[in-house]
Image: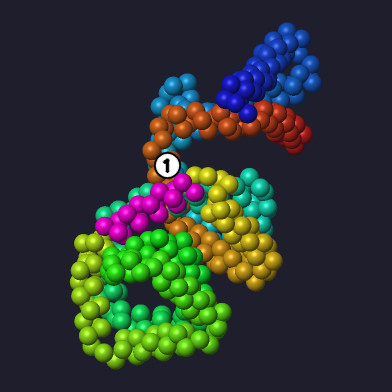
Amino acid sequence: MNDQLKKSQLKKHKMLATGLFLLMAFVYILMMYLLKNNPQKWMEYVRAFSEAGMVGALADWFAVTALFKYPLGIKIPHTNLITNNKDSLGENLGNFVSTNFLTADTIRPYIDKLSISEYLNDWLSKEKNQQLIHNECSKIIQRIISNLDDESIAEFLATKGFELTSEIRLEKLAATSLLYLLEQNEHDRLLNIILPQAQHYVENNRELIYKKVVEKQPILGLIGGKSVTNQLISGITTFLEEIEKNPNHDIRKSVTLKLYQVVEDLNEKDDWHDKFDQIKEEFITKEKLYEYTKDIWLRLKEDMLEKLSDQNATFNQYIKQNIQQMIVSFREDQTMQENIDKYARQYVYKMVLKNSNEVGKIITNTVQKWDGTELSEKMELEVGKDLQYIRINGTLVGGLVGLIIYTLTHLFL
């Protein structure tokens, strides 16, 4: 209900109460006139009723008016009560709310009905809220990634990388890796790839091989060097083909043994350790690692931000799937829901009891900050309409009491 309508209703009820007072005054004057000119017994009773009604109307008008303002503008003591006692009213109201509403007995029934899990289930079931969670998660992640200091991240990664490489013995790592490849027969697979290519290279470069042979041995060019070269090439290709087709060929065994020997040397000989340390000192410096890590981080950062901006990107789909899984898990986990409700109720209960006095202080301070006249006008606007019934009842009840007193007086005296 707006203030304009409240003002209209207040005015109408004031006019009704005042009109009833004026009616009592008119009846009283009329009865006095009739009693003087043509007295009748019943007129005395009507006069007594109207006289007492006027007194009751005036008394209750004074009482109601004294709450909100000075009656007729006269500063009578203990009037304009709301304006003059605003501060104490605020303090009393604050204490009243704290001691009567925010107590353990009054708030417990309401808190026991509190079901955060039910509200969460309902809220999470709506697709727009799920999308809202996803959008907010993406924004938070984007903000975190965007605000990260690139220099600090690169420095941190370079430092940790340098510390890690300093602790790692590269020759041991190389030995372990090579041993793994040997155990998996990866060296045989590598030979199977290389040998056909070697045969192909030899066959396709006969002329080049001939020229190289003649350069080293010019006399072969005079005595049929091409024939010798072709025989040499055929021998090489046949040899390579034999190695390729025979998994137990001596060359394969020799290569395998040699590689195992390399593994053993890597693990036992100090010169390998010195060689790898020299490589680390030359190529794995903190400065170079910083350049590498900074470049990698900037590329990774750009890629992550780009994927977060794309709703259809795999990363965003992953976030959505996890949100949906979380919602499903929450719905099915009754224990979690009960625990959430339990902790929420305990927290609210403790917070309300702990801060009940603060609520009272807020009410007190708020009321005390209000302007007294404005507060009085607002309160009259809210309850003034109902208070006019006090004036109306006072007029009628006063008239009846006056009539009863007059009647009893004439009956017994």
Say which amino acid is labelled 1: Thr
169 to 356, vertically: above or below: below
**Which residue is found at the position 53% from the left and 88% from the top?**
248
**For mark 1, does the 10 Å Cα neighbourhood hold few (<14), some (14 to 19), or many (20 or more) residues?**
some
> Does 383 sit left or right of 217 as displayed?
right
Q: Where is residue 25 in the image (x, y as percent from the top left)?
A: 65, 17
Depth check: give the residue in front, 351 or 137: 137
Taking the view exactly as shown, the residue that stands out farthest to the top is 37
The quarter of the image holding the C terminus is top right
Give the quadrant of residue 198.
bottom left
Q: Does the magenta stretch include residue 397?
A: no
The answer to whether residue 96 is visible is no
Taking the view exactly as shown, the residue that stands out farthest to the front is 223
Q: Does the magenta stretch include residue 293?
A: yes
**Which residue is found at the position 51% from the left and 76% from the top?**
238
Residue stretch in magenta = 291-307
> Does 198 sit left or right of 105 as displayed?
left
